Image (cartoon, grey):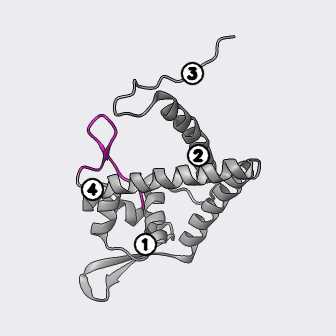
Amino acid sequence: MASRRSSVPTPRSGHDAEEVRVLMAASKIVSAAIAHSFATTDAKVTLPQLRVLVMLRDTGPMNMSAVAEGLGVNPSNASRTCDRVVRSGLLDRRDAPEDRRNVALTLTAAGRRLVDAMLRQREVIFGQVIDRMSERQRSQLAAGLAAFNEVAHELSTEGGGVADGEGHLLRWLS
């Protein structure tokens, strides 16, 4: 039986195809853990709605402009997304005390529980894999991922950002 390998673009910027292949394989595992935690929630939220909840959990209260920027959408799309999450009881939307023309978006207790439960599931899944690794492997993984995260953060905060090869800028949370 022939081995099935995903096709990886030819190296362009000094990286080697094996490095990208290994990262792509790891991304499948991470994606599976995320998809599992997303699918097993009692609350029915869309991915953009979940991104709003995670942004608020990580940063605290935000205004609509900050949410729109974080999602990479215009403010009216962000507002519609947030309205749905407010109706589901996971998000609170109030006039900002310092400027009543602005709104302050915060997680409700139910919203925090949802995000925390999803993140706990991922921690359990990743923990099972890490527990099977040797101390040396764990140390290498931590160092490699820390470097990867640092460079990704630098790229995302620079003017050009990170693109998908088709002209779309990628957005992720710090």
The mark found on residue 141 in the picture is none
Q: Of all residues shown, which one is farthest toward the top? A: 1
- Decide which of tag 1 and tag 2 comes sooner along the chain: 2
Bounds of the magenta segment: 160-174
Q: Is 1 in front, or is 14?
A: 14
Q: CA distance from mark 3 to mark 2?
A: 18 Å
Image point 55% across, 56% down: which residue? 44
Image point 37% across, 33% down: which residue? 14
Q: Secondary structure at mark 4?
A: loop
Residue wearing tag 1: 59
Q: Taking 45 as reference, is 76 left or right?
A: left
Residue type indicated by callout 3: Arg
Residue wearing tag 2: 30
Question: Is the residue 51 above or below the residue 107 in the image?
Answer: above
Point out the frontmost of discs 2 and 4.
4
Residue wearing tag 3: 5
Residue type indicated by callout 1: Thr
166 magenta-colored: yes
Circle 4 crowding by C-alpha within 10 Å: few under 14, some 14–19, many from 20? few
